[in-house]
Amino acid sequence: MIKFLTKAFPLTLAFLIAGCGFFEDEVPEDIFFRMTGPSGSQVTVIYSKQFVAGVNEIGETRVEVFGADTVVHTLPIDTIIDVTLEQRLFMMATPVMPTDTIEVEARVDVDGRNIFLDQGDLLPLVPWQFLYQYNVTFTADLEVII
């Protein structure tokens, strides 16, 4: 009986560990981005996976973008970005018209988990910015260099 228990225990332990997600890969694959607002409103969004970001001694996060795509969207925006290789994403949005103020709601999910949900005004001189990098924490105060 003891021999059976000693042989069964490692097997049971292996099933328990496998069942609890111990061996699952947590590296992000996809970022889902949705921005809603008045239908037909146009927004310019800069998307980048090519940047350097870090927090300085006074708590500001500095983002230096060295490669990006700029896209003019008509709201609503509903897109999925593959981040499997880079494991990071920077987005910055402004109204296309420099005189427009647009009330928007933005949502960002990483592999189906919501990590950002907020609403507010999108202003021409105060862009909406979002910064994500796997296993790195940044401050909300961003300084962007493009």
Image: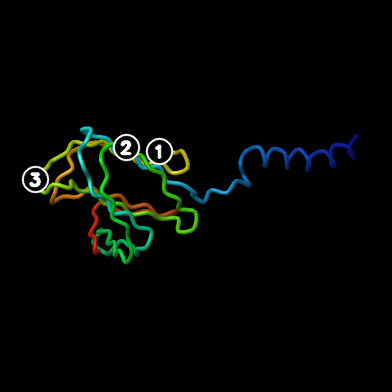
Indicate which disc residue 99 carries: 3
Badge 3 density bin: few <14, some 14–19, many ≥20, Cα 10 Å? few
Q: Nearer the viewer, residue 53 or 38?
A: 38
Image quarter of residue 55: bottom left
**Residue position for label 1:** 114
The residue wearing badge 2 is 117
Whether pointer 1 and pointer 2 mark residues with C-beta atoms closer than 8 Å, the reply is yes
Disc 1 from disc 2: Cα separation: 7 Å
For mark 3, give the secondary structure: loop
Which of the two labelled residues, at mark 2 and mark 3, occupies the earlier sequence position? 3
Q: Residue 33 location, x and y as percent?
A: 36, 42
Report crowding for label 1: few under 14, some 14 to 19, many 20 or more residues within 10 A (C-alpha): few
Q: Residue at x 67, y 41 (%)?
A: 18
**Label 2: how many Cα within 10 Å (few below 14, some 14–19, many 20+):** few
> On screen, 61 above or below 76?
below
Please state which of residues 75 and 103 is positioned toward the viewer in this rendering: 75
Tell me which label, 3 or 1, sits earlier in the chain. Answer: 3
Question: Which residue: 24% across, 56% down?
Answer: 142
Q: CA distance from mark 2 to mark 3?
A: 25 Å
The local secondary structure at tag 1 comes to: strand
Q: Nearer the viewer, mark 2 or mark 3?
A: 3
**Residue ID at (41%, 55%):** 88
Q: What amino acid does circle 3 point to?
A: Thr
Question: Which amino acid type is shown beneath numbered disc 2?
Answer: Leu
Decide if residue 76 is on the left or right side of residue 19. Answer: left
Image quarter hosting the C terminus = bottom left
**Extreme residue toward the left, this view:** 99
